[in-house]
Amino acid sequence: MKSIFVGNLPWSVTNEELEKKFSEFGAVSSARIMTDKFSGKSRGFGFVDMPEDADAEKAISAMNGSKCFGDRELTCNEAKPKTDRKDRKPFNNRQNSNYSF
């Protein structure tokens, strides 16, 4: 099974529309648009899971850079595993700042 990252989606696209578009290339296990946890609005990206790697590669090749949902060029690539937040550097790291407070 391969998970596909789909970025630069219009905010109006639904899970069903995303699944329908990717099912043109093969079976789709799931399609989900990521939403803001407070407002519930789309964040402009989502993930599509396809059980067959060959179908997923065809979908990535065909959909990356396409304007199938309007005038925005999609970004499609193989999804990378989510990193552990403990490994990320802090956003506001004053120890490495050039400013003195």
Image (cartoon, rainbow, N blue to C red):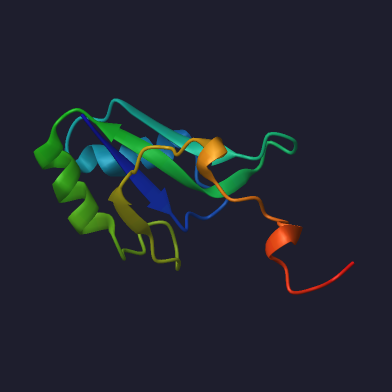
| Residue 5 spot, x, y in % from top left | 36, 46
- Residue at 17% from the left image edge and 35% from the top image edge: 26
Which of these two is toward me, 96 or 90? 96
Q: Which residue lies furthest to the left in this view?
A: 54
**Horizontal relation, residue 87 to residue 53: left or right:** right
69 shown above or below 79: below
Which of these two is toward me, 45 or 101? 101
**Horizontal relation, residue 94 to residue 19: left or right:** right
23 shown above or below 69: above
Q: Dividing the image into 4 quarters, which one contains the C terminus? A: bottom right
| Residue 36 spot, x, y in % from top left | 66, 40
| Residue 97 spot, x, y in % from top left | 72, 68
- Residue at 19% from the left image edge and 27% from the top image edge: 51
Q: Residue furthest bottom?
A: 98
Q: Dividing the image into 4 quarters, which one contains the N terminus? A: top left
Q: Which residue lies furthest to the right in this view?
A: 101
Name the quadrant containing residue 48.
top left
Name the quadrant containing residue 83.
top left
18 shown above or below 49: below
- Residue at 29% from the left image edge and 25% from the top image edge: 29
57 shown above or below 48: below
| Residue 54 spot, x, y in % from top left | 9, 40
Total number of numbered discs in the rendering = 0
Which of these two is toward me, 90 or 29? 90
